[in-house]
Amino acid sequence: MRENTQDNLPLEYSTESDQNTIVGFWIFLAAEIALFSTLFATYAVLFGRTGDALEPAELFEPGIVLMMTFILLTSSFTCGLAIHFMREGMKTRLMIWLIITALLGLSFLGFEIYEFIHYIHEGVSLQSSAYWSAFFLLTGTHGVHVALGLGWIVLILIQLKQRGLTSVTNRKVFVVGLYWHFLDVIWIFIFTGVYLIGMVI
């Protein structure tokens, strides 16, 4: 059964405090955009400055990058389904899709860790050159954000289990959904600006 307020607003918008929190989170995301914009600008400036290290085209593996992209974009879809079932008041389905989202995010992190280990074994790291420092800093920062998002989802799942669907838990689910979609958008820029360009230039 759908849980709406008298004003027919979603439950996560039912109080002024919840509304202010959501607006505040949008402001936080704006700050995150500034952070990643700085990292992308740094990467662009240092692109090609590999020194004596291997070139990105020699190391980037299209299959792994495409798999990581597919996994993360799929997790964005499952996160959207979780929000849908939250709005419908279906706690069990909401939790199931949040768990699936978390598992996909964990798989993405697994591939990223494998990728970093592979590159290090091939002889590139933060210290290898200006380019590789920028690469690891940009992609690593995104990976840390994904890991934080996973921890956040786990905590929300615990609260949903204990408290059920309330304006507070719904607001937390909605906010973590915004965060997760933001990370997917950032990854699209990384996929295009880092991996695709790095493989052809």
Image (cartoon, grey):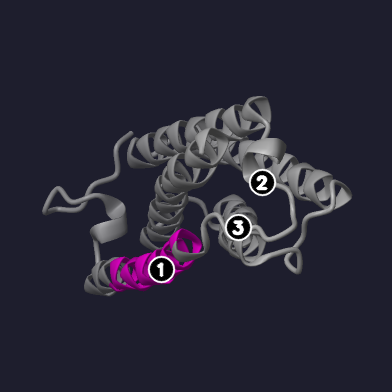
Q: Name the amino acid, label 3.
A: Phe
Q: Which mark is residue 135?
A: 3
Asked which secondary structure carries label 1, the reply is helix
Answer with left or right where residue 20 lies relative to residue 158.
left
Q: Is residue 24 above or below residue 55?
A: below
Q: Name the amino acid, label 2.
A: Glu
Label 1 Cα neighbours within 10 Å, binned few <14 / some 14-19 / many ≥20: some
| Quadrant into which the N terminus falls | top left
Q: Residue at x 41, y 57 (%)?
A: 166
Which residue is outermost to the right? 121
Give the magenta range: 24-44
Q: Earlier in the sequence, mark 2 or mark 3?
A: 2
Q: Residue at x 29, y 44 (%)?
A: 3
Q: Residue at x 84, y 53 (%)?
A: 123
Q: Which mark is residue 110?
A: none
Q: Earlier in the sequence, mark 3 or mark 1?
A: 1
Residue 170 location in percent, x, y? 40, 54
Q: Report the residue marked by disc 1.
A: 32
Residue 81 location in percent, x, y? 42, 32
Residue 147 location in percent, x, y? 65, 57
Q: Is residue 41 magenta?
A: yes
Q: Report the residue marked by disc 2.
A: 55
